[in-house]
């Protein structure tokens, strides 16, 4: 799997390269600025891009802007954005085109190599990987939402994991319950939120995220 | 040709409109002049009182008379300043010195003003000090003594018009009095009438000239009188500068205090949080080094613990950074940072923004934290459900309005939060206005003078 990596801090960039190569990924290019990133994305068409939000030359949200611009040019180009902080605002912008293949994680998540590489693979496959912090913020700002308040604690746990972008199988593993139980919870959640059920993991996740972003 | 005709008719209309505007201005000026005259009549008694009291104070030493008389002078001057602002649209700054404070010195004596004394000065002494040493009060007295003259000047056009009008009416009055020729001929002479009360044509012309002349000169006369009044009431440049220096000194002290407190808080947070965690991690790693061969399982557990500690250290640092300067503010600027705040709030917040560029970073930061605190207030104290935020830049000021549908009744003097915001904005000459009737809604308006720099960078980098 070919990856374009954008990270301006040398140590972190080398660390990420080592980690990704150790897990069988191929680094197509490792760049350190916004313009370089955009060129690499459009020219190399990687399977997935791993991008730091803040990059030179402006050290603002250069990386995010470059990723969004590249996705406009190459629709559905999978992008996993890493940041020192997560903002609902950025998550919304990444999800705005509704096509999936996006991830938005805190940089700390790379500490856990298994979960991080799992997120990279998920995004490359057109799924989503949202940081638990983003989901927590989304749920907090939806605190007054009636249908959400009607969920049982277990359903809420399932919803949180699902919103992070995990498949039913992954949710079942995390919560130590059977896959059948997860899909039962999922059906109930979708009914309570008034969403159309879907068999496709990705589409289900996107529907939940759209619900949380919409209200 | 048709085009020309239209243009000519256009200019004709324009002239007619201009004439009508001029007329209405003339009548308005007459009204202003009469009101100014009316106010100037009110100054006669206070002037007499003030002059007598000051004379008695400084000639006979009746020191208790001056302060109330000068206070009255100040009152009249304040009223005139208000009237000038309302009617003439001339804002006249006030530059009174602050009330003298008494400072207890360590040696048991008291300092007030420039004097040091053994006994605590009484209230009347403070008043005396305050009213007799303030040049602004003496400027008010100077205005008071010329107010009547200026009032009379403002009334001249109205007098001319009255003269012209009454003169035209003299023949009518003479006829009505049934004794033509026997009336008071001096009164007739004032109005240029013949002894029989009739007007000759030159008299008609002259009286008409008085009427229209009065109307014509009204704006000029009244404006001049108003300007003179404003000039007499205005503090000279150095008084204004003194006041400005005083204000800057105050706000600078506040800003430095706030900054020092902020640094102390950050130091404490780092010391108790991240630093302590790093020490623990170092200890753990040392232990791992020793355990690695003897007890790999324990070493592995310690390593997991260290990773956990590094994650919490990062979490704490993130919170700290957010409190110092929110990353989204640095990356996107004020408008998007406020949108991010709105998204994170549990309330339904709508943001309307119109900012063509970015403000100075310190201004952005002050406004961001102010809005953040207002949102917290709306959720915590006002029990609001919806909030509307409007951010825009008008000419030379940044204006932010935060409206909530909560229960209202907020009071800046009691809520230390609002006071804090006010103080922080004051560093940038910014102001906070609060409207919060019981039952709501609460509207807080922030306004900071500032210029916007180049257009936002995010969209340009998006294109490049």
Image: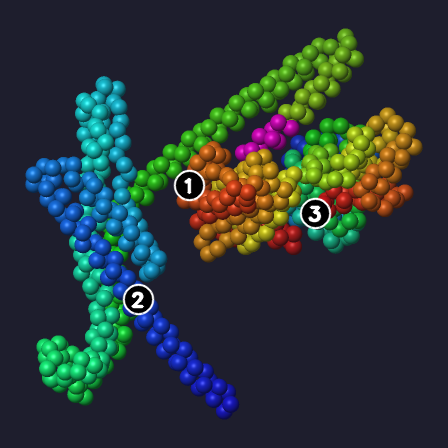
For the residues carrying marks 1 and 3, which lies nearer the camera in this image?
Answer: 1
Colour pattern of the rendering? rainbow
What residue is pinned by disc 1? Answer: B426
What residue is pinned by disc 3? Answer: A93
In the rendered structure, find residue B31 and report the number of the disc placed on it.
2
Which one is in front, B115 or B264? B115
Disc 3 residue crowd, few under 14, some 14–19, many 20+, Cα 10 Å? few
Q: Chain of mark 1?
A: B
Residue B101 visible to an observer of this rendering: yes
Earlier along the polypeptide chain: callout 1 or callout 2? 2
Give the overall secondary structure of the magenta segment: helix
What is the x, y in percent for residue A172? 87, 30
| B215 up-or-down from B241: above or below | below
For the residues carrying marks 1 and 2, which lies nearer the camera in this image?
Answer: 2
Determine whether label 1 and label 2 are within 8 Å by CB.
no
Which secondary structure lies at badge 1? Answer: helix
| B142 up-or-down from B293: above or below | below
């Amino acid at each position: 799997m070919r990856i374009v990596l954008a990270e301006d801090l040398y140590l972190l960039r080398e660390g990420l390269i080592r980690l990704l190569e150790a897990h069988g990924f191929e680094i197509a290019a490792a760049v350190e600025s916004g313009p370089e990133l955009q060129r690499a994305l459009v020219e190399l068409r990687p399977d997935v891009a791993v991008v730091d939000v803040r990059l030179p030359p402006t050290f603002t949200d250069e990386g995010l802007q470059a990723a969004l611009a590249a996705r406009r040019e190459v629709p559905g180009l999978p992008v996993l954005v890493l940041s020192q902080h997560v903002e609902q605002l950025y998550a919304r912008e990444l999800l705005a085109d509704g096509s999936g293949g996006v991830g938005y994680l805190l940089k700390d998540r790379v500490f856990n190599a298994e979960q991080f590489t799992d997120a990279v693979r998920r995004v490359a496959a057109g799924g989503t990987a949202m940081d638990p912090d983003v989901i927590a913020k989304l749920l907090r700002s939806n605190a007054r939402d009636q249908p959400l308040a009607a969920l049982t604690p277990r359903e809420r746990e399932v919803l949180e994991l699902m919103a992070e972008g995990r498949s039913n199988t992954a949710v079942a593993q995390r919560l130590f319950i059977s896959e059948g139980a997860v899909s039962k919870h999922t059906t109930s959640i979708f009914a309570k939120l008034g969403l159309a059920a879907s068999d496709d993991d990705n589409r289900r996740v996107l529907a939940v995220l759209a619900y949380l972003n919409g209200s | 040709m048709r085009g020309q005709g239209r243009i000519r008719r256009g200019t004709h209309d324009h002239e007619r409109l201009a004439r009508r505007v001029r007329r209405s201005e003339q009548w308005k000026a007459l009204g202003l002049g009469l009101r100014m005259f009316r106010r100037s009549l009110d100054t006669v008694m206070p002037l007499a009182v003030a002059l007598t009291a000051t004379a008695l104070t400084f000639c006979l030493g009746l020191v208790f008379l001056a302060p109330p008389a000068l206070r009255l002078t100040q009152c009249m001057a304040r009223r005139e300043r208000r009237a000038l602002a309302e009617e003439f649209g001339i804002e006249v700054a006030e530059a009174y010195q602050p009330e003298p404070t008494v400072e207890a010195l360590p040696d048991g004596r008291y300092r007030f003003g420039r004097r040091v004394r053994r006994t605590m000065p009484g209230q009347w002494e403070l008043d005396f000090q305050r009213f007799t040493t303030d040049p602004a009060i003496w400027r008010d007295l100077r205005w008071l003594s010329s107010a009547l003259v200026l009032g009379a000047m403002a009334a001249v056009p109205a007098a001319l018009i009255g003269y012209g009008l009454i003169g035209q009416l003299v023949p009518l009055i003479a006829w009505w009095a049934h004794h033509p020729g026997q009336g008071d001929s001096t009164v007739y002479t004032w109005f240029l009438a013949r002894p029989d009360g009739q007007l000759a044509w030159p008299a008609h012309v002259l009286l008409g000239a008085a009427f229209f002349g009065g109307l014509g000169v009204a704006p000029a006369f009244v404006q001049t009188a108003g300007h003179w009044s404003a000039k007499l009431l205005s503090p000279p440049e150095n008084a204004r500068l003194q006041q400005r220096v005083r204000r800057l000194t105050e706000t600078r002290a506040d800003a430095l205090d706030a900054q020092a407190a902020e640094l102390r808080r950050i130091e404490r947070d780092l010391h108790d949080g991240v630093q302590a965690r790093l020490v623990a991690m170092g200890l753990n790693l040392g232990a791992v080094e020793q355990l690695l061969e003897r007890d790999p399982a324990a070493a592995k557990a310690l390593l997991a613990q260290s990773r956990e500690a590094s994650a919490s250290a990062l979490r704490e640092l993130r919170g700290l950074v957010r409190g110092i300067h929110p990353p989204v503010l640095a990356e996107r600027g004020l408008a998007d940072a406020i949108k991010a705040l709105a998204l994170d709030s549990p309330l339904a917040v709508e943001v309307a923004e119109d900012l063509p560029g970015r403000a100075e970073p310190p201004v952005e930061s002050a406004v961001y934290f102010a809005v953040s605190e207002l949102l917290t207030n709306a959720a915590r104290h006002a029990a609001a459900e919806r909030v509307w935020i409007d951010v825009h830049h008008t000419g030379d000021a940044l204006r932010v309005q935060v409206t909530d549908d909560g229960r209202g009744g907020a009071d800046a003097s009691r809520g230390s939060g609002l006071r804090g915001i006010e103080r922080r904005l004051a560093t940038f000459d910014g102001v906070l206005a609060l409207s919060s009737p019981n039952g709501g809604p609460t509207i807080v308006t922030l306004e900071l003078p500032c210029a916007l720099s180049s257009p936002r960078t995010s969209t340009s980098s998006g294109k490049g």
